[in-house]
Image (spheres, helix red, strand yellow):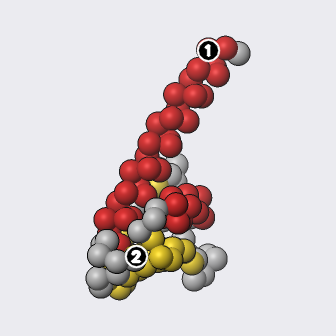
Amino acid sequence: MEKAQFSPNGRILRLKAKILKKNANELKIEVEGAGHTLCNLLQRRLVEDEATDLAGYDVPHPLASNPVIYVRTKGDEKPETVLKRAVGKAREMNKEFGKAFERALKKA
């Protein structure tokens, strides 16, 4: 796995992912540079999906920001498809928040 890239002020420019386990209904990935904020958001979007049987994440060591995201799906749905859908929903939420924030600024 390549290392996450950081800007001079310490902000993450690109997260890196490593597949730890993958089969027909399970996916376990390590995401270097991610934290609880991203993982919690993805977990929430995953559990909303009817194809998800189980979803969660773990931060194995508090000093190393390399959380592990786990998803298990029902039936024939591939876990990577469900995770991609969760990422899309998170992106859409981000866009909607940006629009709502801009509207609120104009009213203030």
What residue type is disc 2 on?
Answer: Thr
- For disc 1, the neighbor class at 10 Å (few under 14, some 14 to 19, many from 20) is few
Q: Earlier in the sequence, mark 1 or mark 2?
A: 2
Quarter of the image where one finds residue 32: bottom left
Residue 87 in sight in this render: yes
Q: Camera-side residue: 74 or 38?
A: 74
- Closer to us: mark 1 or mark 2? 2
Residue at image mark 1:
106
Residue at left offset 35%, top offset 85%: 21
SS label for mark 2: strand
Please state the horizontal and vertical placement of residue 36, each as a whole percent of the image.
60, 64
Q: Quadrant of the N terminus?
A: bottom left
Q: Quadrant of the C terminus?
A: top right
Q: Is residue 98 above or below residue 83?
A: above
- For disc 2, the neighbor class at 10 Å (few under 14, some 14 to 19, many from 20) is many
What residue type is disc 1 on?
Answer: Lys
Residue 13 in sight in this render: no
Residue at left offset 39%, top offset 64%: 83
Question: Which numbered dot is residue 74?
Answer: none
Please state the horizontal and vertical placement of residue 95, each as a whole percent of the image.
47, 36
Question: Which numbered dot is residue 73?
Answer: 2
Residue at left offset 37%, top offset 81%: 26
Quarter of the image where one finds residue 22: bottom left
